[in-house]
Amino acid sequence: MIEVVVDALEGFCATVFAPLVTMAKVMTAALPAGRQPVRADLAAIEPLAYAELRRPDHLVAGSGLIADPALIADAPWHLAWWTTDAERRIEPLAVVSDPARDGFRDYTVLEWWATPRRTGRRHVTGPYVDYLCTDAYTLTFTVPVLHPDGSMAAVVGSDVYVARAERVLLPALRALRRPATVVNAAGRVVASTHPAHATGAPVRSPSDGWRRHDSRSVPFSVLVRA
């Protein structure tokens, strides 16, 4: 039965990552050869982000592209990101993009940016409270957009509220008929049927009687009490 939970976990991540991989390929193809891009060159990101925010499963709460600060000639520190409100209306995220102004935040030091730049691979950040975009426990999925030389030009990504991830994961956890918890690589709780394991709380060393089952494709594990 534990395989069913791991499959549900990996399937959930795949449904978020698959469109982002396509999005990254479109953005890589849009990078002009021989010159620095301008914002108009990357305009295709908007309909792709809208498509994620209009998914029938309503998983995605925010989506878009975050450029390397040196990438776009007419828009340094460019964050092309859209979110939905309670009425499912799509709105651009308002951010301070001028480093000299109060409220500016250097996104290149944040995990969802820094890890893909370091590894050249997709990444899931969280669960964490996303004060930049959602102000709620969030999982941020990011995929690097690469230059031909392999360096990172930007990331494309999607935010998923943990509460929405729970809708996918909890039925499989409950089907085990024993306490079970999904944690990230740092041991923080994503979803759980155990009352002592609150969302976002660390469970670094499960007590005796718990078994750990690692996913081989995503940075999550399932803890199950024997």
Image: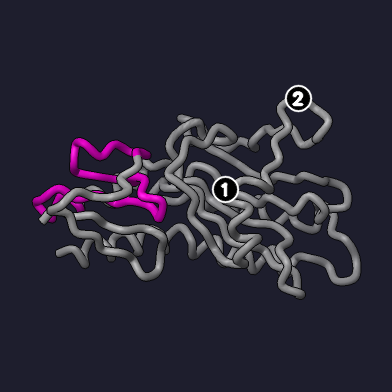
Image position, residue 33 (x, y; %)? 85, 71
Image position, residue 66 (x, y; %)? 68, 50
Which amino acid type is marked by label 1? Ser
- Whether residue 102 is situated above or below residue 99 in the rendered picture: above
Residue 157 lies in the magenta stretch: no
Question: Do we see residue 132 in this rendering?
Answer: yes
**In this rendering, position of residue 117 left or right of residue 203:** right
- Whether residue 96 is situated above or below residue 14 in the rendered picture: above
Query: Looking at the image, is mark 2 or mark 1 earlier in the sequence?
Result: 1
**In this rendering, position of residue 16 left or right of residue 142:** left
Residue 199 lies in the magenta stretch: yes
Q: Secondary structure at mark 2?
A: loop
Residue that carries the numbered disc 2 in the rendered image: 102
**Nearest to viewer (mark 2 / mark 1):** 2
Residue at point 36%, 43% (across, down): 164
Q: Residues within 10 Å of mark 1 (few under 14, many from 20)?
A: many
Where the N terminus falls, by quadrant? bottom left
Residue at point 61%, 46% (across, down): 110
Which amino acid type is marked by label 2? Asp
Direction bottom: furthest residue = 149
**In this rendering, position of residue 64 left or right of residue 150:** left
Q: Quadrant of residue 212?
A: bottom left
Residue that carries the numbered disc 1 in the rendered image: 63
Q: Quadrant of residue 226?
A: bottom left
Q: Which residues are drawn in magenta?
A: 172-201
